[in-house]
Amino acid sequence: MKKYFDFAGHGTTYQKEILGGITTFFAMAYIIVVNPAILANGGIPKEANFTATILVTIIGTLLMGLYAKRPFAIAPYMGENAFIAFTVCISMGYTWNQALGALFISGLIFVIITALRIRGWITKAIPDSLKRSFAAGIGLFIIFVGLNETGIVRLGIPGAPVKIGDLSSAGSLLAIFCLLLISILMIRRVAASIMIGLLVTTAAAFVAGHARLPDSFLSLPPSLEPVLFKLDIGGALSLNFLPVILVLFIMAFVDTMGTLIGVSARAGLLDADNNLPQIEKPMMADALATVAASLLGTSTAGAYIESAAGIEAGARTGFASIVTAAMFLLCLFLAPLLVAVPPAAYGAALIVVGFLMLAPLKNLPFDDYTELFPAMATICMISFTYNIGFGMASGFVLYPILKLISGKSKELGIGIWILFVLSLMLFIFYPYAKT
């Protein structure tokens, strides 16, 4: 096993990989509850989707671990699930079966272009400044997620998009405690600092009555029958449905690209040219997971930014992904116990991980505005639109425009122009909600 995953080459051990895999699980376990709840708004049966979400996560993460040998977990994407439920099904009036049909088609396209190495070739064309912005932007995104999960920051008040939360609440106080504990442990270079902080805070939440152990630990998973193979491919092939397929394809395309590069940068997996070696393998894993998601009855699947938490805990190889998949397998039967970790614990862990992912900011070319402005636009839009895909698309649109205006068109390759066109199409064809 050590030889297969090249533990020596990555400077890792079983202990680090297991801790990393478990940490990733706890950081993203919320998806098994949140994803079915969101998709239920679009009509997808909630109980069946609970099982589908876990199965897709297991399949995708095992593919990532065994085939791609990377420490990244795969699960249904946040953002894409809301797009399917609220935009495609509610606003546009299509059925969830048609949405899954569109997802199947986009997944097949992913598989084909990945097998032809087109996705990898396009990814290598991304400028270094934008690659650095992905990691920093995702870092801020994770921080924002963590701040909201813990209640330190709240959304949606009249006249302002965000506000300070109730810092006297038990959740906020526990989160602050967790932040301080993890910070102190990391400063003292204690191994497994994030996991220790997460577990200690969870225990404290139980003792304080902020969280409670479930009444029963064991449960059988709900039947998958209501959503299994219920996709409507024929209904998704209509001309009117083409923009939906296009948006699903582009959002997942740029989301996965940015997540892989950003998280790999933190893990030290990029080469001297800031490229991820053999990137086609993790891309094929997420492409196959997306096809599986459409067949099993849930939304677009891809590499998860919460994998950064596991990487920070020591994960460096695909063995950590196998551990994460095993934890999700337990969730099929032990879901009440394994999802008992409160947001105060995993949210605080995400904030710390987000802090650490801001490091690439120091390497941005602040003296070259044709590089700096697209990079900063990417970072800001990832954070402020709460959408990695839109943030990256902003950078891909702005970068060639500024280079062209500045007389630096020779710096632009075919790959960046392809990304420009895809990103521009995303903004043009995205069915924006009317207010």
Image (spheres, rainbow, N blue to C red):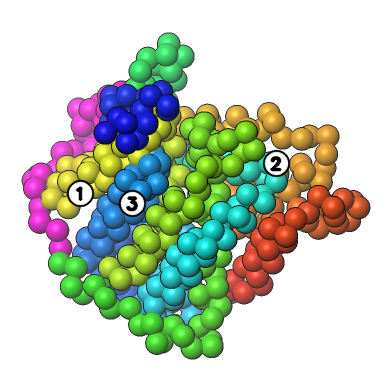
The residue that appears at 27% across and 68% down in the rendered structure is 296
Q: Residues within 10 Å of mark 3 (few under 14, many from 20)?
A: many
User: For the magenta stretch, what is the residue range?
Assistant: 196-222
> In this view of the protein, which residue sits in the foreground, 358 or 63?
63
Residue 316 appears in the picture as rendered: yes
> In this view of the protein, which residue sits in the foreground, 158 or 180?
180
**Numbered disc 2: secondary structure:** helix
Q: Reading the chain from its start, which is encountered first: label 2 or label 3?
A: 3
Q: Is residue 299 above or below residue 208?
A: below
Q: Amino acid at mark 3?
A: Leu
Which quarter of the rendered picture does the C terminus lie within?
bottom right
Q: Position of residue 157 (x, y in %)?
A: 53, 52
**For residue 254, which quarter of the picture?**
bottom right
Q: Which mark is residue 329?
A: 1
Q: Position of residue 366 (x, y in %)?
A: 78, 34
Q: Residues within 10 Å of mark 2 (few under 14, many from 20)?
A: many
**For residue 193, which quarter of the picture?**
top left
Q: Reading the chain from its start, which is encountered first: label 2 or label 1?
A: 2
Cα–Cα span, label 2 and label 1: 39 Å
The reply to whether dot 3 and dot 1 touch (C-beta < 8 Å) is no
Q: Position of residue 37 (x, y in %)?
A: 31, 61
The residue indicated by pointer 3 is 63
